[in-house]
Image: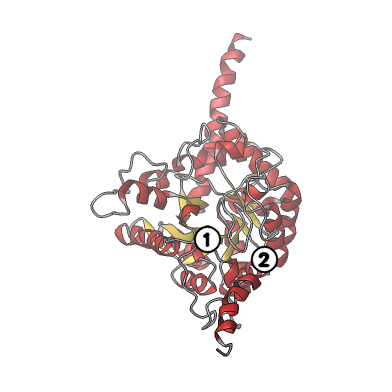
Amino acid sequence: MWTSWWLWPLVAVCAADSFRNEAERIMRDLPLVDGHNDLPWQLLNLFNNQLLQEANLTTLADTHTNIPKLKAGFVGGQFWSAYLPCETQNKDVVKRTLEQMDVINRMCQMYPEDFMCVTSSEGIRQAFREGKVASLIGVEGGHSIDSSLGVLRALYHLGMRYMTLTHNCNTPWADNWLVDDGVDKAQSQGLSDFGQQVVKEMNRLGIMIDLAHVSVATMKAALKLSKAPVIFSHSSAYSLCRHARNVPDDVLQMVKETGSLVMVNFYNYFVSCSEGANLSQVADHLDHVKKVAGAGAVGFGGDYDGVTRLPVGLEDVSKYPDLIAELLRRQWTEEEVRGALANNLLRVFEEVEKVSNHSETPEETPIPLDQLGGSCRTQYGYSEAPGLHQQPGALLAFLVPLLFSLQPL
């Protein structure tokens, strides 16, 4: 009897080791693709994007992400976030976005043995074969295109492969999640007419539509309109944590119907709705997405280096194998694990690429001038008469002095 008491802890340890060993075996063959990492934002804040003289990505100590941690975590693909806060909207956001995209490309140039910048699903597979981290650009926030289809196209040609339609603010053409909390007012009731053009143009180009950060109305509008599957690059399950940044079950059902993808976020407040969380609770979110939307809808979007509180057991990017081991312990099949690791994202990416059609006529109707914010805008292209596309009151104010000037003296 006493012998059995001593054996149980040993059995438990051996079982845990076996799940961890199995996780590593699978991940050596098929590494993980993470949907959202904010290391470029940290590079801006800590080093003003000076990689040569300041930042060493091998020895970075105060971030969730560095090269050794990525290797320990079997991360083989990463969507790096080109993110700028909402305060840049209607100011210098396009310039700043270009700078963040540039620093991602320079990461690949400075560490060619570790990072491989790619722009396609096949590029990810090639990086896997070469043992490098496939590095892709996700632009976090539709304010980065400054309501311009031309800028959207330019960012695509510079390597952007997903765009989050909003961040924590409305754009002139899409509503963000704070609308659902009552903090912001709905402006577009999901997507405006111009917002629908943005979605269509993203489909045409082959840019994944990211619905993290958007309102429920925007989620549903984009899911209905898009011809290709969409992603939530870093969102969790609303049913387990009733935070408006998470995905409700009726939307998860639409995710299932459209073959879309939810890449689960690790931020404590999205996992447990409190300051503390643990690895098991993240696995609960993965289980829930699988249960409601199907195993093909599950992915990982840890939000490392973009959040301040992370679950116990998932403190940095090196901890991914422990999460995979937990899924195996919960009797996820190897096929389901491989889907969550990379195959689900690759399927969505390939579908987006198939839907794209660069020979199709681009969307080109500009957003109405009166829908744009900011006081420093020029009006080139809208009209030779500055106010013709403004509200009727502004037009009247422009015409009245003109009419009086034409009266005979």
Q: In this figure, which residue is indicated by the disc labeled 1?
A: 143
* Along the viewing direction, whichever of 156 and 221 lies nearer the viewer: 221
Camera sees residue 363: no
* Along the viewing direction, whichever of 191 and 327 lies nearer the viewer: 191
Q: Residue at x 32, y 54 (%)?
A: 49
Q: Position of residue 255 (x, y in %)?
A: 70, 56
Q: Quadrant of the C terminus?
A: bottom right
Q: Residue furthest front?
A: 409
Q: Residue at x 58, y 75 (%)?
A: 366
Image position of 160 with respect to 61: above or below: below
What residue type is disc 2 on?
Ser
Dot 1, how many residues are within 10 Å of its Cα: few (below 14), some (14-19), or many (20+)? Answer: many
Image side of residue 262 versus residue 253, left or right: left
Secondary structure under the numbered disc 2 in the rendered image: loop
What residue type is disc 1 on?
His
Q: How many marks?
A: 2
Figure colour scheme: secondary structure
**The disc label shown at residue 192, or none:** 2
